[in-house]
Image (tube, helix red, strand yellow):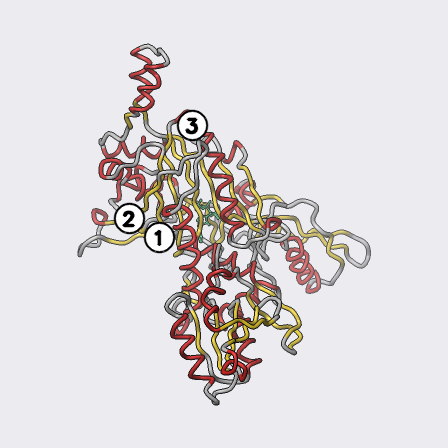
């Protein structure tokens, strides 16, 4: 059966990551003191540093120092920060009002709600002690790698209540959505005891609604954006009119998006409020495949530059039947999350969107969004094209290539990728995050070996100097071993200790988080040392 995200089984690696991330102030449940709110998360002191580091790394690679294009010249790219709430017609034009739906199934018995396409069903059969095979009914489970196991466990429990026997493992799971209404009425829900309590799937629009102004009526209804991309399309003309960019060029944006996900789950993987990093690249239609392939490769390179192992990343090309009617191609960059492993789950999508979005906004806004390509006009004239051809071809609606990724999903990927659990510091199962130094929330811990003999003064001065350039922490308390361990846990790559020798020869020890090796470095060279080590 296909594998999608599934709830992590208890005691697994995902639980350990979530727990360490909570204990060390990376990610908290939103409104935790009120029991939490489903689908929302708060980023704690270290989480916000990690998230901002990834954000800045993306912004630098996309906007401030974009890659060199296929023709050898740097790409034109500008940034944007558009409003979360836009005119409701934006979402009519984009298709979100009519089509941004997930099929949803409710359970009348448990009141639980499921994504219909995540429900899989199979007949539950047991071999009784007398050898007879008996069908207990049709049961459903949420899809995922462990769905088969969950199914067997569930059926086993019921079998035991009804006289025992061995569960006959299902050979085929059938998607709930493929059943007829009569068959659906026979299914027992994933958490239910009775059959026939699941409703038929019905579309559920995932946009969050609010009201603009004091009157809370239909006329003032607005939507919290479900993606940042539409703010880019609606500003495409503004950017062309007010800056020096010319097609091909890109507009990049990072910001919050909101989706009323039916089943938010797997920690921050699928939440109702999340952050996206999106870029729309506008190009001439006849160059669109070239740019699609270019961005596909560039984006994979970028993920690897975060220190993610190549074998944990892969491309997944969308099949033709997955593509929107206007799209020529779409590929996902997937990561091997602990809850999808050995399979992969989406991290970023790179879509060829054709001229769909700008055409839609042109139609709905009645504003001209086509582009007059002077360079192309010249080229066509020079090539001897007919005046009709020159006229027809040099004015067009650009095609768009869209690399769209989740910033909060990237935080999850880095937490998973950096998580280590090994024997060290005298602890059998010591857990820590081995972030790439450049992305680590804290770059260096600065300690006096003991809080006397002139050591704190030197260490404090070093801290006051270094903190101008690097995110550092000064810590004079507890044993040095405990201080190292605390820094390791939160992923700090370097621990710098002022000790008895420092006064004599003006040097400190620098301990490396991953190897735990120590080296002596001159006090005056510490800043250069860190700069070198923190280079991309
Ligand atoms: P999915 O299939 O996982 O629902 P999608 O294909 O709808 O995702 P896009 O609309 O392409 O996602 O959004 C681009 C990126 O935004 C995704 O690759 C993902 O990293 C991130 N993203 C989308 N939905 C969520 C969410 N609910 N929570 C966290 N990140 C999300």
- Quarter of the image for residue 67 reads top left
- Quarter of the image for residue 424 reads bottom right
Mark seen at residue 82: 2
Mark nearest the camera among 2 and 3 is: 3
Looking at the image, the residue that sits furthest to the front is: 505
Say which residue label 1 marks.
255
294 or 90: nearer the viewer? 294
Q: Say if residue 112 shows up in the picture.
A: no
Q: Left or right: where does residue 280 sit relative to residue 105?
A: left
Q: CA distance from mark 2 to mark 3?
A: 28 Å
Q: Earlier in the sequence, mark 1 or mark 2?
A: 2
Q: CA distance from mark 1 to mark 2?
A: 9 Å
- Give the residue displayed 37% in from the left and 31% down from the top: 283
Mark seen at residue 287: 3
Determine if the C-beta at disc 1 is less than 8 A from ligand 1.
Answer: no
Q: Earlier in the sequence, mark 1 or mark 3?
A: 1
Whether pointer 1 and pointer 2 mark residues with C-beta atoms closer than 8 Å, the reply is yes
* SS class, disc 2: loop
Q: Left or right: where does residue 333 sit relative to residue 457?
A: right
Crowding near pointer 1: few (<14 within 10 Å), some, many (20+)? many
- Quarter of the image for residue 474 reads bottom left
Crowding near pointer 2: few (<14 within 10 Å), some, many (20+)? some
Q: Earlier in the sequence, mark 2 or mark 3?
A: 2
Mark nearest the camera among 1 and 3 is: 3
Q: Which quarter of the rendered picture does the N terminus lie within? A: top right
Q: Left or right: where does residue 361 sit relative to residue 140?
A: left
Whether pointer 1 and pointer 3 mark residues with C-beta atoms closer than 8 Å, the reply is no
Please provide percent x and percent y for residue 295: 46, 38
* SS class, disc 3: helix
Mark seen at residue 280: none
């Amino acid at each position: 059966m296909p594998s999608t995200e599934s709830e992590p089984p208890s005691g697994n690696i995902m639980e350990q990551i979530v727990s360490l991330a909570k204990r060390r102030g990376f990610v908290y449940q939103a409104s935790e003191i009120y029991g939490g709110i489903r689908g929302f998360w708060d980023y704690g002191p270290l989480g916000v540093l990690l998230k901002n580091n990834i954000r800045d790394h993306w912004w630098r690679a996309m906007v401030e120092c974009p890659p060199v294009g296929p023709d050898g010249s740097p790409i034109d790219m500008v940034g944007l920060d558009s409003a979360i709430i836009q005119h409701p017609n934006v979402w009519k034009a984009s298709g979100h009002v009519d089509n941004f739906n997930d099929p949803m199934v409710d359970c009348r018995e448990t009141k639980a709600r499921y994504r219909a396409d995540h429900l899989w069903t199979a007949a539950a059969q047991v071999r009784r002690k007398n050898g007879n095979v008996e069908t207990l009914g049709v049961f459903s489970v949420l899809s995922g790698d462990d769905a088969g196991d969950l199914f067997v466990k569930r059926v086993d429990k019921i079998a035991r209540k009804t006289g025992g026997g061995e569960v006959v493992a299902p050979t085929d799971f059938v998607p709930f959505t493929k059943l007829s209404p009569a068959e659906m009425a026979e299914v027992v829900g994933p958490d239910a005891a009775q059959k026939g309590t699941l409703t038929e799937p019905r579309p559920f629009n995932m946009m969050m609604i609010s009201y603009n102004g004091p009157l809370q009526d239909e006329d003032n209804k607005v939507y919290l954006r479900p993606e940042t991309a539409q703010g880019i399309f609606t500003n495409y003309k503004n950017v062309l009119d007010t800056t020096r960019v010319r097609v091909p060029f890109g507009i990049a944006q990072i910001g919050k998006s909101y989706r009323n996900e039916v089943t938010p789950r797997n920690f921050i993987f699928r939440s109702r409020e999340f952050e996206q990093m999106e870029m729309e690249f506008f190009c001439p239609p006849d160059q669109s495949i070239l740019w699609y392939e270019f961005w596909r490769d560039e984006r994979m390179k970028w993920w690897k530059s975060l220190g993610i192992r190549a074998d944990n990343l892969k491309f997944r090309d969308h099949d033709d039947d997955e593509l929107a009617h206007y799209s020529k191609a779409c590929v996902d960059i997937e990561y091997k999350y602990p809850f999808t492993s050995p399979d992969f789950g989406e991290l970023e999508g790179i879509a060829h969107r054709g001229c769909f979005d700008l055409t839609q906004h042109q139609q709905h806004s009645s504003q001209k969004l086509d582009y007059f390509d002077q360079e192309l006009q010249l080229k066509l004239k020079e090539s001897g094209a007919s005046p009709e051809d020159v006229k027809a071809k040099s004015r067009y609606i650009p095609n768009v290539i869209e690399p769209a990724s989740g910033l909060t999903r990237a935080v999850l990927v880095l937490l998973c990728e950096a998580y280590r659990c090994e024997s060290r510091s005298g602890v059998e199962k010591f857990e820590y995050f081995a972030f790439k130094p450049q992305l680590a929330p804290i770059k260096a811990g600065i300690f006096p070996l003991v809080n006397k003999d002139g050591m704190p003064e030197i260490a404090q001065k070093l801290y006051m100097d270094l903190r101008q350039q690097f995110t550092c922490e000064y810590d004079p308390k507890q044993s040095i071993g405990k201080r190292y361990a605390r820094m390791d846990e939160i992923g700090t790559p370097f621990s710098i200790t002022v000790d008895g020798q420092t006064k004599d020869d003006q040097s400190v020890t620098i301990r490396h988080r991953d190897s735990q090796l120590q080296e002596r470095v001159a006090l005056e060279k510490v800043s250069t040392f860190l700069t070198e080590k923190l280079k991309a």
